[in-house]
Image: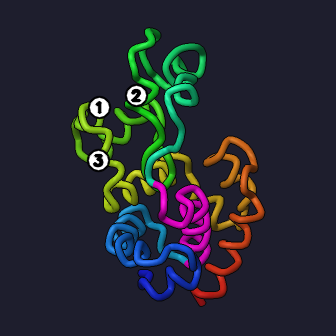
Amino acid sequence: MSISAQQLLQILPHAGRNAGVFVPGLNATMGKYAIITRLRMAAFIAQIGHESGQFRYVRELGGDAYLAKYDTGKLAQRLGNTPEADGDGQKYRGRGLIQVTGRANYEACSEALFGDSRLLATPELLEQPVYASMSAGWFWHRAGLNTLADKGDFLTITKRINGGTNGLEDRKAIYKRALEVLQ
């Protein structure tokens, strides 16, 4: 089962022309990661739709002060960034439709997508539609979210992606539209 630009616009009406830009990458991603049933597709699209502001953002917003939390301290260390204030927070900020964040995650994603560490040198690749989509599929697969989607456990999916329930109502509204469109 694949999705068309028209269906995507019905689900994510604020995506505009970006819907068509992302369709090829999304269809390739969903095929590769077995996001091919109605429940899986609806949950995936709802999550990436919210996380990316309906395909408007594939790069985490925030200036140096905001991103400093990724550069030093416990969070930076947990993300695999170096302990020095050397710009890792900026370089490995969240990117993709489900934001890959931190050096360790970039390295794991790069290995999965490319079989090498190219994302460490060029993290901006995750801002390109196909890789933004593929990185989201990689995260989805790694977190075991197809199983949760099959059970309709949308709340746990949200928590695994977001770390909490930020934007839950918007995610649910998109999910509902996706289930209606993907009949």
Residue 139 point in image, percent of width and height: 48, 48
Residue 83 point in image, percent of width and height: 46, 10
Does residue 1 show up? no
Residue at the spot 59% in from the left edge and 22% down from the top edge: 75
The residue range painted magenta reads 38-57
User: What amino acid does circle 1 point to?
Assistant: Leu
- Element under disc 3: helix
Residue 129 point in image, percent of width and height: 34, 61
Residue at the spot 71% in from the left edge and 77% down from the top edge: 176
Does residue 19 show up? yes
What whole-number distance in Å separates the C-alpha atoms at marks 2 and 3? 14 Å
Disc 1 to disc 2: CB gap under 8 Å: yes
- Element under disc 2: helix
User: What amino acid does circle 2 point to?
Assistant: Arg
Question: Which comes sooner in the sequence, label 2 or label 3?
Answer: 2
Of residue 117 and residue 120, the one placed in the foreground of this image is: 120
User: What amino acid does circle 3 point to?
Assistant: Leu
Give the residue at mark 1.
Answer: 120
Give the residue at mark 2.
Answer: 103
Question: Which comes sooner in the sequence, label 1 or label 2?
Answer: 2
**Left or right relative to 85: residue 165:** right
Q: Badge 2: how crowded within 10 Å, few (<14), some, or many (20+)?
A: many
The quarter of the rendered structure image containing the C terminus is bottom right
**Left or right relative to 170: residue 24:** left
Question: Which comes sooner in the sequence, label 3 or label 1?
Answer: 1
Q: Badge 1: how crowded within 10 Å, few (<14), some, or many (20+)?
A: many
User: Where is 117 relative to 112, above or below?
Assistant: above
Residue 114 point in image, percent of width and height: 24, 45
Res. 125 mark: 3
Of residue 16 and residue 181, the one placed in the foreground of this image is: 16
